[in-house]
Amino acid sequence: MQSDELIQDFTETLIGSAKRHGVAEALPRRPASGRWSGEHFIEIMQIVGRTLDDAHFGLGRTRCPLQAQQFGVEVMLLSNNLGDALDRYRRFFQIASNELAIEIERTPKLVHIELRGPGLETDPHQFLIEWNAVRILGISQWLVGASFPSAEVTFAHKRRLPAAVYTSVLGENVAFERAANRISFPVHELSRRVIFDAQDLTRLWSKRFEGNTGNHLNENWSALVKSSLRDSLLRMEPLPTMEDLARKFRVSSQTLRRGLKAEGGSYRAVKDSARREVVLSNIGDTSLTLGQISVLAGFAETNGLERAMKNWTGQRPSDVRRDMLKNSGAKSQ
């Protein structure tokens, strides 16, 4: 499979960054086959990002808070259509990252999404550009439940792998050594409705259990826990503990903890994600004060939202609110 070669290349780039930053000891051992799987790539990406707390995996001149990237995609899920989603993503990264810039240009026939990232000095393989091209095109298609077969992807740097490797992932229209890093597809695709929500994103990004999982065959533990936490937040009830949730799901707390760990998560991480979704659902509503949103998200202290938003985006809640409302107007005056 040609896409496997891109997985090997991306994984080795992340391993190289881990070695340069002295965190390689946390990585899994190379498989006996010598080939990394897609699961290995995701695992190594998560480890490097989490250890460095950097969504750019140590490949930029400055750090981007790890949770900022997921936060940016969750912002897209608040949109009615793909055009609005991409605009939100672009505005979010204007405040979240000093390394990755996204610009969107609409023409009568095409929309062009231009990517600019760190230079060859810190990212010699241009991993951040290539990975984000894969990611943005993939998420755009996933959001609307459609493929864009006529999409074109160009890169400014030289091609290092066979052309077939890139076309197997990005489609038939991929070119290198062009004027810009750019994703282009028909402009009418922007009017497509966003059909997924934040819970669907959890399912997409979390690992699924294999084999028989009893009553939870069609769920994963992260989604179940987050759904319960969100329900409690929306009812303004105390958040259930791990033990409370285990009783609700009729499993032991150890089984639940192991299940979350197998999906690459934890109770604390899922709770943080549930709170983040509540904040995202309300921060654009100017009839609510930031203090009220902090209470809705279940923070015990009035400055809880401030600390959490700094951790998620590196910005203050007021800055995120202002950027989200820019050019679109407030929901309430």
Image: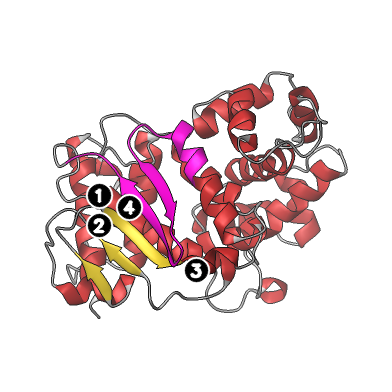
- Residue 178 position, x and y percent, is 18, 58
Q: CA distance from mark 3 to mark 1?
A: 26 Å
Marks 2/1 in contact by CB < 8 Å: the verdict is yes
Marks 2/3 in contact by CB < 8 Å: the verdict is no
**What number is the disc on residue 141?**
3
Kind of residue at disc 3: Gln
Q: CA distance from mark 2 to mark 3?
A: 24 Å
Marks 1/4 in contact by CB < 8 Å: the verdict is yes
- What secondary structure is found at the residue carrying circle 3? helix
Q: Is residue 230 above or below residue 195?
A: above
**What number is the disc on residue 44?**
4
**In front: 181, or 291?**
181
Q: Earlier in the sequence, mark 3 or mark 1?
A: 1
> In front of the other: label 3 or label 1?
3
Q: Is residue 120 visible?
A: yes
Q: Earlier in the sequence, mark 4 or mark 2?
A: 2
> In front of the other: label 2 or label 3?
3
**What number is the disc on residue 11?**
2
Kind of residue at disc 1: Leu
Q: Earlier in the sequence, mark 1 or mark 4?
A: 1
Residue range highlighted in magenta: 90-119
Q: Earlier in the sequence, mark 3 or mark 4?
A: 4
Q: Write down the residue under mark 1.
A: 14
- What secondary structure is found at the residue carrying circle 4? helix
Q: CA distance from mark 1 to mark 4?
A: 7 Å
Q: CA distance from mark 2 to mark 1?
A: 5 Å
